[in-house]
Amino acid sequence: LETFSSMLRDRKVDGFIIPRTLVHDDRIDLLRRKNFPFVLFGRTSDPADCAWFDLLGEDAMQDAVRRLASMGHVRIGFINGGLQYNYAALRRDGFVLGMQEADLRVDPALMGDDAVTITEGRNEALRMLRLPEPPTAIVCAVDMAALGVYRAAAECGLAVGSDISTLSYDGTPDGAHATPQLSTYAVNFTRSGSTLSSLLIRRIRGEDPETLRETEKAEFLDRGSAGPPTLTSGEIAGRVAKSAA
């Protein structure tokens, strides 16, 4: 926040693009108080006087459940990202709505939070897989958590894409190097950057920020990490128990 204050004080910039928006974001509060032009890459809990561009992560999570349910998955877990980020609540809501639409029960034991690294994703996935009724598929709010699912599956003697499925969001390059490649909802950062720049220029020129709001859907990359369930929840539990013996 001090960096922002310093740049404002010295008039070093004409406007800001704010990435990785928080539920309660001090950067936004500061710029609103100063009536200084800014555009969010994301959304926030208090939208007043905010312009933004964002990807509809909630739609991606809903679609992920729809895809998995159509394949025959019933026990579907969800590993969310950092709860301080505004996207987390949106993606959780999208997952829950997808489960409701598929007439599937949301099991609190199959819901995890605050996983933004491979290790954190691994830990949450291991916790779920060690349950008496583990999931046959796991949806992740971010790719790094999903790559942690790969690690957890390997530790439990399971293969991603056949024994257990996972779908995620981000389209990070790391996912293309997993085996099988991670199926994910990809963000086009080139197009996002261009849109954000255009919105910021319009904001600097005086347009009402609340008229400068655009969203789009992420592109689904089907790369092999999800398929019809080949093991029941009980059979996965047996595999996990055997691997731990």
Image (cartoon, rainbow, N blue to C red):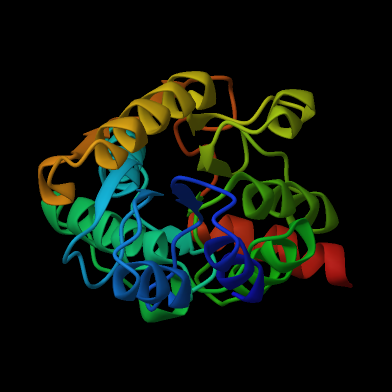
Q: Is residue 87 visible?
A: yes
Q: Position of residue 8 (x, y in %)?
A: 52, 63
Relative image position of residue 200 (x, y in whole percent): 35, 37
Q: Nearer the viewer, residue 21 or 187?
A: 21
Instruction: State whether residue 55 appears in this view.
Output: no
**In the rendered image, which quarter contains the N terminus?**
bottom right
Along the horizontal axis of the image, is 123 left or right of 5?
A: right
- Residue 112 locus on image (x, y percent): 51, 73
| Relative side of 172 to 36, left or right | right
What residue appears at the point 31 percent right and 76 percent down from the top-left corner? Answer: 33
Q: Which quadrant holds residue 106?
A: bottom left
Residue 223 versus residue 174 in the image, above or below:
above
The answer to whether 151 is drawn above or below residue 132 in the figure is: above
Give the residue drawn at x 73%, y 54%: 148
Query: The C terminus lies in which quarter of the figure?
Result: bottom right
Q: Which of these two is toward me, 224 or 30?
A: 30
Q: Is residue 121 above or below residue 216?
A: below
Query: Where's residue 110, x and y in %?
Result: 46, 71
Point 43% across, 22% down: residue: 194
- Residue at the outermost right position: 245
